[in-house]
Amino acid sequence: MMKLALLNELRDQNPVVFNIANFVTVQDVANGLNALGASPIMSAEVQEAETMVQIAGAVCINLGTLTEQQIHQMHVVGQFANQYHKPVVLDPVAVGAVPYRKAVAAALLEAIDVAIIRGNAGEIAALADIDWQAKGIDAGKGQGDLVEIAKACAQKYHCCVILSGPTDVITDGTRVAQVHNGTPLFQLHVGSGDLLSSIVAAFTAVNDDYFEAAQTACLVLAATGELVASQLTADRPATFAVDLIDKLSLVKVSEITDITVIN
Ligand SMILES: Nc1ncnc2c1ncn2[C@@H]1O[C@H](COP(=O)(O)OP(=O)(O)O)[C@@H](O)[C@H]1O
Ligand SMILES: Cc1ncsc1CCOP(=O)(O)O
Ligand SMILES: [Mg+2]
């Protein structure tokens, strides 16, 4: 069930979201979370992993620019997150294009209980072992039914899955919700997916029904982007990115409710 009141809850609670981020989009993610009403913190040092997890309401692990040292940190952080009952969101960047990354993600998913996996079609299909032609960090092309792919991934890893794209498919392996809001401008801005994953983590920090938290996060970002795009006179990816940060801090529940397209 969609619960947009969670946006106000998030702003009241201002949860700390601990991100193992990539070096490409880290600032967008920090500013986007901050604007929305969460409190981002990034760390790459394994020595402070336990404290970071303790002070956080949720953890987002992004594989974007992984190194061996960081993979070790991801395992340590994930284990502390499970120990302290903090939800983990995994963003499996480019696992559909790079087999090494798929192996890293599979090992993490074996070792750690993850609340939500958030990826594009190419990434989620790869994790579900379904044939798809992913392209770098992008979804690429494939034939399959996106709902069935997302469900297969959720069933395989016993967690919620968000398969994002023009329509976001959200599933716990049985129940399915789809958010149809958004704008193609998201695809012209590198980091839209990373921001979504961290926003998903922020909502899991304030709501322990992860299927519900995932839906709200997808709708809030997609609808906010759609509102921003409706004010632009041409496709301006850079302006879109800046205006998106502004709108994430200004957007009201009523504005999102007015344009919500979900089933
Ligand atoms: N063509 C599109 N139309 C509407 N929204 C989109 C479109 N493509 C992506 N989005 C939105 O962009 C965000 C990032 O998703 P996505 O592009 O799938 O991630 P990634 O950047 O990891 O590939 C999501 O909120 C998704 O709903
Ligand atoms: C370009 C790039 N290279 C490694 S991570 C990254 C950013 C991925 O961002 P997103 O998946 O959110 O578009
Ligand atoms: Mg991505």
Image (cartoon, helix red, strand yellow):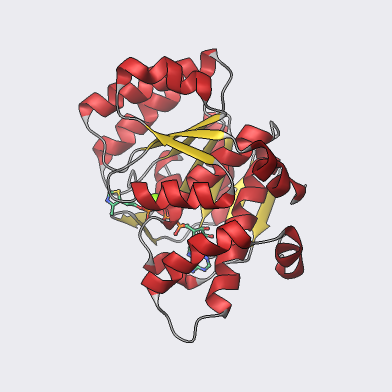
Q: Is residue 181 left or right of residue 233?
A: right
Q: Position of residue 20 (x, y in %)?
A: 37, 34
Residue reaching furthest to the bottom: 233
The one of 128 and 256 positioned closer to us in this rendering: 256
Q: How many marks?
A: 0
Q: Is residue 190 left or right of residue 196?
A: left
* 235 over 127 or under it: above or below: below
Q: Residue at x 62, y 36 (%)?
A: 204
Q: Is residue 199 left or right of residue 104?
A: right
Q: Position of residue 178 (x, y in %)?
A: 65, 57
* 233 over 97 or under it: above or below: below
Q: Position of residue 215 (x, y in %)?
A: 66, 49
Q: Position of residue 104 (x, y in %)?
A: 31, 30
- The image quadrant that residue 10 belongs to is top right
The one of 256 and 91 positioned closer to us in this rendering: 256
The one of 255 and 67 positioned closer to us in this rendering: 255
The image quadrant where one finds the C terminus is bottom right
Q: Residue at x 76, y 69 (%)?
A: 258
Residue reaching furthest to the top: 83
* 143 over 6 or under it: above or below: below
Q: Residue at x 38, y 64 (%)?
A: 189
- Whether residue 109 is visible here, answered yes or no, is yes
